[in-house]
Amino acid sequence: GQNIDQPTEMTATEGAIVQINCTYQTSGFNGLFWYQQHAGEAPTFLSYNVLDGLEEKGRFSSFLSRSKGYSYLLLKELQMKDSASYLCAVRGVNGETGANNLFFGTGTRLTVIP
Amino acid sequence: NAGVTQTPKFRVLKTGQSMTLLCAQDMNHEYMYWYRQDPGMGLRLIHYSVGEGTTAKGEVPDGYNVSRLKKQNFLLGLESAAPSQTSVYFCASSSGLAWETQYFGPGTRLLVL
């Protein structure tokens, strides 16, 4: 089956750097996504990793280690608008159907304080 | 270009009632998905479709049916609603390519009494 773990809540200060970790166990790993979801809104795409290493996109970076089943999302120069939930999602094989689906963690609620 | 739209935005049902949630996308995507999101559970896939006329079960398909009669539309039906189906329902679409993200609609908040 699929198992995706990430911290439930984090708090960080405006202007600081925060790292949100995600560990996973999955069958047929085929990529990892990070999404941002503001309260009451839809998830929006942040990053995609399929190979080991760091992907940088502006203030956001995402890292993947497939051998360790580990990823992190790094947010730099935090702004108040970064207060949101961050969802780790892994593409893997559904054990019952054999299909390639996206499996989501429960999300990490980040609060940015002044 | 509206992206992914969902109707209705909010609905209250009584146990045993039926309803259909409508999802529409204007990005010419082949793949469409229905998820539910519950506190502490994360997003879970209900059903999905890899093209017009096709549907497939996800992680939590029981109690739901779907149809994809047109490429741009994906319907989610609840034949006999139960309180356990109280949730926020998100529709998403994608091109189907492994590295392409899914684009989510704004969600439908459903309360079953």
Image (cartoon, coloured by chain):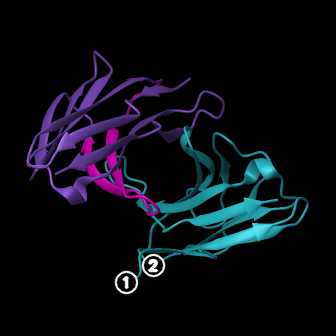
Q: Please give the residue where the numbered disc 2 appears in the rendered image.
A: B26
Above-or-below relation of B74 to B48: below
Q: Of B26 and A76, which appears nearest the observer?
A: A76
* Horizontal and vertical percent position of residue B6: 57, 73
Protein chain holding label 2: B
Q: Is residue B42 left or right of residue A69?
A: right
Quick one: which chain is purple?
A
* Horizontal and vertical percent position of residue A39: 42, 58
- Label annotation for residue B1: 1
Q: At 64% from the left edge and 72% from the top edge, which residue is drawn?
A: B10
Q: Is residue A87 left or right of residue B34?
A: left
Q: Of B21 and B40, which appears nearest the observer?
A: B40
Q: Of B2 and A107, which appears nearest the observer?
A: A107
Protein chain holding label 1: B
Above-or-below relation of A48 to B92: above
Q: Amino acid at mark 2?
A: Asp
Could you say whether the residue bearing mark 2 is in a helix, strand or loop? loop
